[in-house]
Image: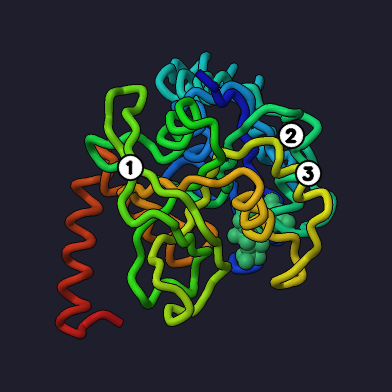
Amino acid sequence: MKKIRKAIIPAAGLGTRFLPATKTVPKEMLTIVDAPIIFYVVEEAVKSGIEDIVLIAGRGKHAIEDFFDTSYELEDRLLKDGKTEILERLENIRNMANIISIRQKQALGLGHAVWCGKKIIGNEPFAVLLGDEITVKTQQQISLTQQLVDGFAQTGRSSLGVLNVEDSLVSKYGIAEVSNSTPKFIIGSNQERFSYYNASKLLEKPKASETNSRWAITGRYVLTAKIFEILENQKPTKNNEIQLTDALDQLISLEGIDVYPSNSLRYDAGDKIGYLQANIEFALRNPELNEELKNYVIKLAQSLTKGTFS
Ligand code: UTP
């Protein structure tokens, strides 16, 4: 059984879609209800059995580090005030995982960010979870990262998670083409059965007319250390950035990559609309906020339909 113990979480992008907020605050620290985006990403990794997290950070590195560290003054105050519930929550966050942070001095692209984790990861296979993307499993389903980790335990091959998208969204994503029309199956660690395909080609944001595939690559991967060798020599392409997708495309011909479809909900929290959707939907799933927010949303929807909102 090949266990995935480490994960890289890239969180050093410039976050230009979220300026001016991201001038000083990394977008991964923007809040979804009452915790930063990165909290939900780390939580998914930890729940999938990851023990060590290599955080790739840029500007605002300390804000992320501090979030997962002890705050003596604050915790002392909460203890004195008898606020045990929130104190316990802060303790849980601090004990979630062993987090090692590395600085990506220049935002040279996602491929470069992953390569920055090489020294800590070494020769082991590892997971990658993009720090600005939140995935939420639907009921009877395991998380996307858990799916990839379970898959690797059985196949030993690199993999990536995909979601089915409509034609109009194809050009917004990396798209995975697959070579087998019928899927293969795996029984996961909690006996859940899920399917996978073999990737034949990865395309970065193609037009819908340029591919028959509708499998959009999500920000969840499990990779062998071979990817570091490829990234070492990777040249910048689209947007003058070292793209992870280019390196993955080469990995297909060297070792193969498997593609795992998922029904998880995915929020691109680095994008304004995705971020707002995540906030509304997370708050609606929160028992403390659900009732009040639901009433507000219904009223708002009514005034939007009537055209009385201004
Ligand atoms: P994005 O492309 O969404 O991040 O990268 P970005 O470049 O910050 O976004 P915009 O377009 O300017 O708003 C996906 C993930 O990879 C990280 C980002 O922090 C994000 O979590 N990333 C990207 C790095 O860590 N380093 C990079 O050089 C680029």
* Residue 15 visible at all: no
- Dot 1: element: strand
Q: Amino acid at mark 2?
A: Ser
Q: Earlier in the sequence, mark 2 or mark 3?
A: 2
- Dot 3: element: helix
Question: Residue 222: horizontal and vertical position, in percent?
Answer: 55, 38
Q: Nearer the viewer, residue 216 or 292?
A: 216
- Which image quadrant is residue 178 in? bottom left
Gap in Å between the C-alphas at discs 3 and 1? 29 Å
Gap in Å between the C-alphas at discs 1 and 2? 34 Å
Q: Amino acid at mark 1?
A: Ser
Tell me how many marks there are.
3
Q: Earlier in the sequence, mark 1 or mark 2?
A: 2
Which residue is tagged 3? 229
Instruction: Using residue 214 as the reference point, say whether residue 8 is left or right of it.
Output: right
Q: Confirm or deny contact between disc 3 and disc 1 (CB under 8 A).
A: no
Q: Nearer the viewer, residue 207 or 290?
A: 207
- Dot 2: element: strand
Which residue is tagged 2? 101
* Mark carried by residue 195: 1
Question: Residue 5: horizontal and vertical position, in percent?
Answer: 59, 23
Quadrant observed for ligand 1 in the rendered image: bottom right
Q: Is 6 placed above or below 118 here?
A: above
Gap in Å between the C-alphas at discs 2 and 3? 22 Å
Q: Confirm or deny contact between disc 1 and disc 2 (CB under 8 A).
A: no
